[in-house]
Amino acid sequence: MGENQTIVTEFILLALCLGPRIQMLLFRLFSLFYVLTLLGNGVILGLTSLDCRLHTPMSFFLSHLAIADMAYACSTVPHMLLNLLSSAKPISFAGCITQTFLFVSFAHTKCLLLGVMSYDRCVAICHPLQYSVIVSWRVGISLVGTSWACGSLLALVHAGLVLRLPFCGPHEINHFCEILSVLKLACADTGLNQLVLFVACMFVLVRPLSLLLGSYTHILATILRIQSAEGYRKALSTCSSHLFVVRLFFGSAIVMSMAPKSRHPEEQQKSLSLFHSFFNPMLNPLIYSLRNAEVKGALRRVLFKESHFLLE
């Protein structure tokens, strides 16, 4: 590192290049989305805790997906909202690395959980009589624990490799400390970081996606063999919500992480980051609650008990 280089101790988080009135409008809109994200995922957590009929492996996986969504949003959205109120907001180097670790950890965990949920649906539909044996509580807890552990460990590796890099300027980052944006600011070779990031993407994106495609191919073949119209409808409805969430999350994640950067200018990257941080976590509880009969039934039972209690 040259003598004329200055060590960066903080980064500047840049906001959208819009007028103050539009930024205030976006602040209110995104604040609403953030509240809906926390509220919707909180409702799923509450229902799975209160309703004994939702004490199943699938609901257990869904509750951990809700936790990952809430944590994922909380790791980035507050800073992004503050950025809409001011033109540039500083964040310390330690705070930026912490945000990078949390963002990567929860994103990786969510990818792995979606893969686990596809396996669960495959067993439930293709091998219903053996479901309780194959996906026992012990297996479910092990799968969830492994997802969280792998997500955290991979994020720790990324953060450790970032810490070894010198940062001498520039020190401006769009929105929040996403790992690719941070690596662009390093004044040293990031080849090892890029290699580890690629391998991690293969593990948390390509492998779960392959498992998803294999599971749903098997599910589709099983559904087509179902003779009963009611059984066909129920099986299709059970999987459609999960498949929609998978398409939203993995599609944007793959574009952000693995697509050639020359095809995606900065403003498009900003839009993808916003979609990833705001809309995915907000849409998940809406999709699952509207398309999942068990969740809707639990919500009706809780609301009925509450209204009955108030009437008494």
Image: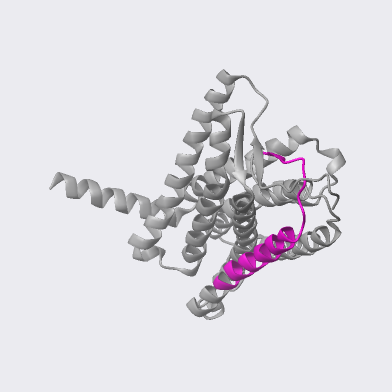
Q: Quadrant of residue 156?
A: bottom right
204 over 81 or under it: above or below:
below
* Main secondary structure found in the magenta portion: helix
Q: Residue at x 85, y 39 (%)?
A: 263
Question: Where residue 155 appears, x then y in whole percent?
Answer: 66, 62
Q: Would residue 204 be found to the left or right of residue 92 on screen?
A: right
In this rendered view, identify the residue nearer to me: 43 or 124. 43
Question: Where residue 243 appears, x then y in whole percent?
Answer: 63, 53
Range drawn in magenta:
145-174
Do we see residue 225 in this rendering?
no
In this rendered view, identify the residue nearer to me: 145 or 295. 145
In this rendered view, identify the residue nearer to me: 15 or 243. 15
Q: How many marks?
A: 0
Q: Residue at x 58, y 34 (%)?
A: 83
| Residue 112, magenta (yes or no) | no
Do we see residue 29 in this rendering?
yes
Question: Where residue 241 appears, x then y in whole percent?
Answer: 57, 51
Q: Would residue 248 be found to the left or right of residue 1 on screen?
A: left
